[in-house]
Amino acid sequence: MTIQTGSDGCDGIGDAAWSPSAGPAALHLRAALNRLIREFFHARNVLEVETPVLSLAGNTEPNIASFSLEFSGRTNGAPRTRWLRTSPEFALKRLLAAGIGDCYELGRVFRDGEAGGRHNPEFSMLEWYRIGWDHLRLLDETVELVRAALALVGRNAGLRITTFRDLYWQALQLDPLTADIEALRNALGDVGIDPIGLTRDDWLDVLMTHRLQPAFASDQLLAVHDWPASQAALARIRNDAPPVAERFELYLGSLELANGYHELCDPSEQRARFERDAAVRAQRGLPSIPNDTALLAALAHGLPACAGVAVGVDRLLMALLGTSRIADVLGFEFAKA
């Protein structure tokens, strides 16, 4: 299928400000992908659920900015500030703790400060959880879903699975779990980056985006698992030498499609990670974000052992159509919203 962007097929529209960003082919493909996703999970007895878009708590992750708004109605003493979700993760985990079982959500999420190129402040996310699975078993299912999506446009892709450590070593002759900041900086070569305020994890991210991802084979799925413990986010940490996070990311070419975890179930550790996020936010002068106390209570009640993954649906559509512009798969991009 060849992508049709902007107003292709709509006579006389041109680049009018009111016209759609994506062409008809891309919009029809989005509908087909949404249908495929629902059929995929229905066949596997995974329940579709809906959770709130507005929440009392935001995302504490320092590298993600949340939108907030003020509610004008009665709150019965609760805070008026509400946060647009950056993912449905916390609410889905509350459902899991309540015993809902395997579930997924396909819906809209929001991130402030991300617009243009590959990013849009409002986008579609698919997130699902499997009880009793680890991240590697969930990786297999994620690959199966992506390959089913590729079949919609008559494509397939090979699969390469590697660890985070081996990926960096094979490409850069660098051990990302032990190398110091100076070694990471030197591995960038002639890539110019302002070093002010960058942490060790920031340098690892820069190496990924500027040295590694551009070289990923365009016709290959690449699964990278067992990440540095410092990048665990909400994943469990396994006590290897050195420790690693039980997490994976899945790429098609240079596009990151999915991020999955063997989920953290310990409420004390989750609270400690919230507190570390708050300390980093304060150090960077970022707004303070309230912790999700409902999530902590659900973890204390008992989150079953599980694995979860989030897939960027717009990114997947971009990969299917071979475009680097997220606007090519959106009915209306941010500038036209």
Image (tube, grey):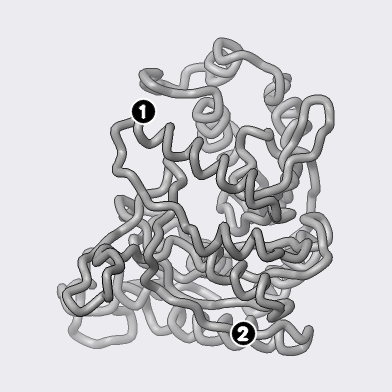
Residue 331 pos. (x, y %) = 34, 78
Most foreground residue, 91 or 126: 91
Position of 336 with respect to 244 (left or right) is: left
Position of 187 with respect to 262 (left or right) is: left
Q: Is residue 218 visible?
A: no
Q: CA gap, disc 2 to disc 1?
A: 39 Å
Most foreground residue, 325 or 168: 168
* Mark 2 vs 1: CB contact within 8 A: no
Position of 60 with respect to 133 (left or right) is: left
Q: Tell me the residue that label 2 is attached to.
A: 48
* Image point (59%, 70%), residue name: 94
Label 1 secondary element: helix
Q: Mark 1: give few (<14), some (14-19) or many (20+) Cα within 10 Å.
A: few
Position of 278 with respect to 70 (left or right) is: right
Location of the N terminus (image quadrant) = bottom right
Q: Tell me the residue that label 1 is attached to.
A: 283
* Image point (39%, 68%), residue name: 55
